[in-house]
Image (tube, helix red, strand yellow):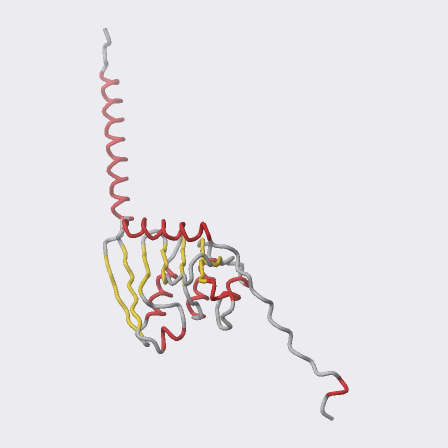
């Protein structure tokens, strides 16, 4: 027959209280990390969409996933590069039209070693999406372009604390990444230098 002494009871009680304390702390931490549901909206032209996106990118600590149709906004592009520099994992999928668009930030991303991919599987990859740290979803009609900020009528939604949306958009990102490829771009043509005998005197 098993006989428990006073010390055995104390050790059992101490272990039970320790485990309960750890569970309680883990629950409190999960509540602290859980993002309260929120939705904010912005409109263009000149309604602060670019600044709102840049601010969310600056808050990123782990990961940014980007799906974009047209991308000519240097402020947003630079904020993605800055995020990569501080250690954030950044992935960018662009529509294939960026391979021929003269003002695209595709070349800037490549120069900064962000290794963007191109989605040429569809006639138009018309997404305008960012998933940040698996907590924040940025979407809407707002293209990441100067025209969208300064001239076009656009809308932008920033959603937080909606894990079911994050799961769906992360899956969609993965589906498009699965058939994306490296960009095929032509090197910029060298500036023509007049032959010495053709130069003006």
Residue at left 40%, top 55%? 65
Residue at far right of view: 197
Residue 74 rendering spot, x and y as whole percentages: 45, 70
Q: Quadrant of the C terminus?
A: bottom right
In the image as oriented, which residue stretches furthest toward the top?
A: 1
Identify whether 6 is placed above or below 121: above
The one nearer the camera, 82 or 129, is 129
Residue 169 in percent (x, y) is at 34, 53
User: 119 or 121: nearer the eye?
Assistant: 121
In this view, 31 is above or below 49: above
Residue in view at x 43 percent, y 70 percent:
75
Quadrant including the N terminus: top left
Q: How many marks?
A: 0
Q: Residue at x 51, y 65 (%)?
A: 99
- State which quadrant residue 187 falls in: bottom right
Q: Where in the figure is residue 66, as x and y percent of width and height?
A: 41, 58
4 left or right, relative to 60: left
Q: Is residue 15 above or below residue 111?
A: above
Residue ranking furthest to the front: 123
Residue in the image at 39% along x and 68% along y: 144
Residue 85: percent from left, percent from top: 49, 58
Q: Nearer the viewer, residue 18 or 133?
A: 133
Q: Quadrant of residue 153?
A: bottom left
């Amino acid at each position: 027959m098993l006989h428990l002494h006073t010390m055995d009871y104390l050790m059992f009680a101490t272990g039970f209280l320790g485990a309960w304390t750890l569970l309680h702390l883990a629950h409190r931490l999960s509540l602290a990390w859980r993002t309260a549901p929120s939705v904010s909206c912005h409109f263009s032209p000149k309604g602060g969409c670019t600044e709102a996106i840049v601010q969310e990118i600056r808050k990123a600590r782990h990961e940014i996933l980007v799906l974009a149709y047209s991308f000519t906004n240097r402020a947003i592009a630079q904020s993605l590069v800055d995020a990569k520099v501080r250690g954030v994992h950044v992935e960018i999928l662009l529509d294939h039209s960026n391979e021929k668009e003269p003002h695209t930030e595709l070349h800037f991303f490549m120069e900064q070693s962000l290794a963007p991919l191109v989605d040429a599987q569809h006639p138009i990859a018309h997404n305008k999406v960012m998933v940040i740290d698996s907590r924040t979803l940025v979407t809407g009609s707002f293209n990441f372009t100067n025209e969208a900020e300064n001239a076009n009528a656009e809308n932008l939604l920033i959603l937080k604390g909606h894990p079911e949306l994050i799961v769906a958009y992360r899956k969609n990102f993965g589906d498009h990444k699965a058939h994306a490829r490296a960009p095929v771009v032509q090197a910029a043509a060298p500036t023509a230098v007049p032959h010495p005998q053709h130069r003006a005197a």
